[in-house]
Amino acid sequence: MNILVSACLMGAACKYSGGDNLCPALVQALKDAGHTPIPVCPEIYGGLPTPRPPAERRDGRVVNRDGADVTAQYEKGAAEALRLARLTGCGTAILKANSPSCGCGAIYDGSFTRTLVPGDGVTAQCLKAAGMSVYTEHTYRLLPDGTKEDAQ
């Protein structure tokens, strides 16, 4: 099964700081189950550079720490991620927790104090609205074979 996966979780250096968020347990679980990860970085697809100033969702917008509104780039990246999911037949996504793009269930509150609030990132919201199942590296369930019921 093809599964859309945040590229940073696969080890790609596309994180805002220029690093990655490699999640070896996730990579191994995908491999063990015979799934094909389809790496995606909505921020890059939206035209943002790496590295870039950190951004958070605030009042329905995405604003970086310098105060620039980058909502349009996040929305473009979300649309491209959905397009890639459709092109590759992905019905499931495993995205980076807490991200203003990929966060699912909890995101930072826009104060840049690492305060989490309930909510979804722009891409997670877009994929869910299209009917996809969306998980994070902490909550993924690989279906239908139940490869991993929960990852912490």
Image: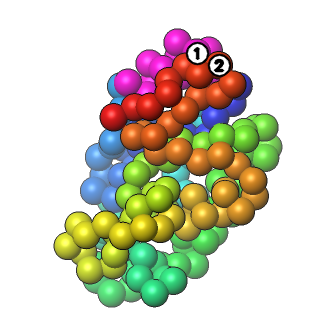
- On the rendered structure, is 1 left or right of 14? right
| Colouring of the image | rainbow
| Residue 138 placement (x, y as % from top left) | 39, 40
Q: Secondary structure at mark 2?
A: loop
Q: Residue at x 60, y 43 (%)?
A: 93
- On the rendered structure, is 35 left or right of 43? right
Residue 77 can be seen, yes or no: no
| Residue 102 placement (x, y as % from top left) | 49, 56
Label 1: which residue?
Answer: 33
How many numbered markers are drawn? 2
Q: Residue at x 78, y 46 (%)?
A: 86
In the foreground, 118 or 123: 118
**In the figure, 104 relative to 76: above or below?**
above
In the foreground, 123 or 83: 123
Q: Quadrant of the N terminus?
A: top right
- At label 1, the amino acid type is Ala
Magenta stretch encompasses residue 35: yes
> Which mark is first along the chain, 1 or 2?
1
- At label 2, the amino acid type is Asp
Residue 5 can be seen, yes or no: yes
Q: Residue at x 64, y 34 (%)?
A: 3
**How many residues crowd around disc 1 within 10 Å: few (fewer than 14), some, or many (20 or more)?**
some
In the foreground, 51 or 108: 108
| Residue 104 placement (x, y as % from top left) | 49, 56
| Residue 151 placement (x, y as % from top left) | 40, 31
Residue range of the region highlighted in magenta in the rendering:
25-36
Label 2: which residue?
Answer: 145
- On the rendered structure, is 17 left or right of 79? left
